[in-house]
Image: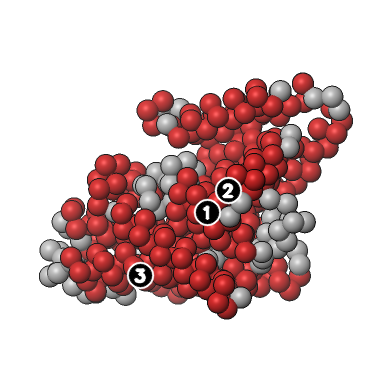
Amino acid sequence: MNLLIISIFTIGYFAIAFEHPLKINKSATALLTGVLCWTVYILMGTDKHLISEQLTEHLGELAGILFFLLGAMTIVELIDAHDGFDIITSAISTTSRRKLLWIVCFITFVLSALLDNLTTTIVMVSLLRKLIDDRNDRLFFIGMVVIAANAGGAWSPIGDVTTTMLWIGGQVSASNIIVKLILPSIVSLLVPLSIISVKLKGNTKKSLLEPVQTGTRLTLTERNIIFFTGLGGLIFVPVFKTITHLPPFMGILLALGILWIVTEMIHSKKDEEEKDALSVAHALRKIDTPSILFFLGILVAISALQSTGLLNGLAQLMDEKIGNLNIIVPAIGLLSAIVDNVPLVAAAMGMYDLNIYPADSYIWEFLAYCAGTGGSILIIGSAAGVAAMGMEKIEFGWYLKKISLLAVIGYFAGALFYIAQEYLFF
């Protein structure tokens, strides 16, 4: 049974990794893999009632992650529908390549921590299209945006899906992951940023930024209200969890509910056609539902490996053969550059028991850092990289040649800083 489940999972994993050559959407593959793993488990298992209870228990945990993602993505789409991100983009006026690089990376780093690395990358790539006319220059900037977005998402409980998974799963607390990872994440960005800054001189060829244009259907006040209400709601989620001890998805649903009411009140006097494009219902139609289904499928598959005891066995094998977490965890991070970091982190969560490694243990923050920043090494290694690749048609080989080495240097610099920080100060 175990061999068959491993085979199904491995085949599904390769199908996900080679989504583009196979021309099969990874969400479909993930859903099929997850269902087949549990089907084999229950058909070949001895206690079908116990297996059904295990699935129900896992589904409760997964629902929290999925509802959180659904709420967060809806809020971001609603802000975007109201041109809220223009508040950020319109504030940049410099054409100096070096200054612009630092400004863009700083904004990306901060915005990624407040929102998420995928959304931030989409926003910043759109911005760079307005700022830089020369494609070669723009690609360098976008490569650094991927590194900055993943670094910024790693230290925030809402900045990266993998970090959010660890936070919701109880492996890390919001305050602790910020304190432990903000400096290593900054180091992982500053090192490659400093290296590439030396090569950048002169000014960008063309700046197309214009003042924010507000049409008749959307005033500046309306845009600002939605932007700050939505952003404030996202930032409040960790505070809500700390105060109430309710799961994070309750906080995100509270923020969405408040923003929904505010939106309805602001646009109550507009006609239905004009109001619809600015509504939560429209934002819900625009969110990336296939990505949510992908997370569901892959997490369901991982939960099957966990329930059969395969992940615990793998953890014991790694402890016996390697034993050093300072080697195991960075290796997981490097692997996340090749395969999706969501299933890797989900697997690690199942491999290491909270009874042995309680919340905020050394391994969990280190795993959040490595899985988050390791994905920058290859352009297919993170959601941010895949988004940039799709928007700008960046070739895998170009990124490997121009950006990967910078990402590797930054990754290990941040990892060494984390290890040193842990041994010296914590």
Choose the circle earlier in sequence order: 3 or 2: 3
- Residue 264 location, x and y as percent? 58, 62
Residues under numbered marks 3 and 2 in contact, where contact means CB atoms less than 8 Å apart: no
Q: Residues within 10 Å of mark 3 (few under 14, many from 20)?
A: some
Amino acid under disc 3: Leu
What's the residue at 74%, 43% (across, down)?
58
Q: Nearer the viewer, residue 176 or 232?
A: 176
Amino acid under disc 2: Ile
- Residue 75 location, x and y as percent? 54, 59
- Residue 25 location, x and y as percent? 47, 31
Q: Residues within 10 Å of mark 1 (few under 14, many from 20)?
A: few
Q: Is residue 416 visible?
A: yes
Name which quarter of the figure residue 41 lies in: top right
Residues under numbered marks 2 and 1 in contact, where contact means CB atoms less than 8 Å apart: yes
Amino acid under disc 1: Ile
- Residue 48 location, x and y as percent? 84, 27
Report which residue position mark 1 lands on.
Answer: 327
Report which residue position mark 2 lands on.
Answer: 322
Q: Nearer the viewer, residue 271 or 414?
A: 414
What's the residue at 36%, 56% (across, down)?
408
